[in-house]
């Protein structure tokens, strides 16, 4: 019963890590990465749609992204969505392909981005702690129902804390790696 509760809690913690990694992939680092624009929402026939669903995105050069829509009529909407996003990039449209030149980051922008990373990392820490809280609540409920002894509850509680510490450490490592990537010239 304890193992089942811990396994469910660990699965939720893994999802929090996946969300953090997806968020951090969308933060610009000065190098062209298709992940920068994949989640840009484009108004496509009245429906907000992720850019990755409307076009192929490639990075033929370290400072260039090419977006080739499957439906050429969506070029204007894609261009508008990129301009309205918080990426700070200006698209160049030749009628078939949109090119995004990724300018080098200024020192000021790098510092702003590290603050954004720190905020997202803190949100991930909170999510992991919330998973721990819910897991502990489940363990308490199981103990109240006399599904296991009080000693087993404390062993489970210690295991839950070790699990939480491991995931918090992982969140910090991911955040530190992203900050280093941003600050790298």
Image (tube, helix red, strand yellow):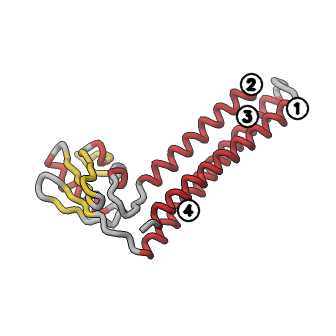
Q: Against 83, is 20 above or below?
A: above
How many residues crowd around disc 3 within 10 Å: few (fewer than 14), some, or many (20 or more)? some
Label 2 sits on residue = 1
Q: Residue at x 73, y 34 (%)?
A: 138
Q: Quadrant of residue 31?
A: bottom left
Give the residue displayed 12% in from the left and 58% down from the top: 94
Residue depicted at x 11% and y 55%: 95
Distance of label 2 from label 4 (alpha carbons): 36 Å
- In the image, 51 versus 107, the foreground residue is 107
* 2 or 3: tag closer to the N-terminus: 2
Q: How far apart are the alpha carbons under marks 4 and 1?
A: 39 Å
Residue 17: name its quadrant: top right
Of marks 4 and 3, which one's residue comes earlier in the chain?
Answer: 4
Mark 4 → mark 3, Cα distance in angstroms? 30 Å
Q: Which residue carries the number 1 mark?
A: 150
At a point 43% along the width and 75% down the height, the residue shown is: 107
Q: Which residue is mark 4?
A: 118
Residue matched to label 3? 138
Q: Which mark is residue 92?
A: none
The crowd level at tag 1 (other Cα within 10 Å; few <14, some 14-19, many 20+) is few
Q: Nearer the viewer, mark 2 or mark 4?
A: 4
Image position, residue 144 (x, y; %):
83, 30
Q: Identify the element where label 4 is drawn.
A: helix
């Amino acid at each position: 019963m304890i193992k089942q509760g811990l396994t469910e809690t660990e699965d939720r913690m893994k999802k929090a890590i996946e969300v953090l990694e997806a968020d951090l992939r969308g933060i610009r680092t000065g190098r062209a990465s298709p992940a920068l624009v994949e989640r840009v929402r484009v108004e496509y026939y009245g429906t907000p749609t992720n850019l990755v669903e409307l076009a192929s995105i490639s990075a033929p050069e370290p400072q260039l992204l090419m977006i080739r829509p499957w439906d050429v009529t969506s070029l204007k909407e894609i261009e508008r969505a990129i301009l309205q996003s918080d990426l700070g990039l200006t698209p160049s449209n030749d009628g078939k392909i949109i090119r995004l030149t990724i300018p080098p980051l200024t020192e000021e922008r790098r510092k702003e981005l590290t603050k954004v990373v720190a905020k997202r990392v803190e949100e991930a820490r909170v999510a992991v702690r919330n998973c721990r809280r819910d897991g502990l609540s489940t363990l308490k409920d199981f103990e109240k129902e006399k599904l296991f002894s009080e000693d087993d509850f404390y062993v489970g509680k210690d295991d839950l804390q070790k699990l939480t510490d491991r995931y918090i450490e992982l969140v910090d490592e991911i955040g530190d790696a992203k900050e280093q990537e941003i600050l790298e010239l």
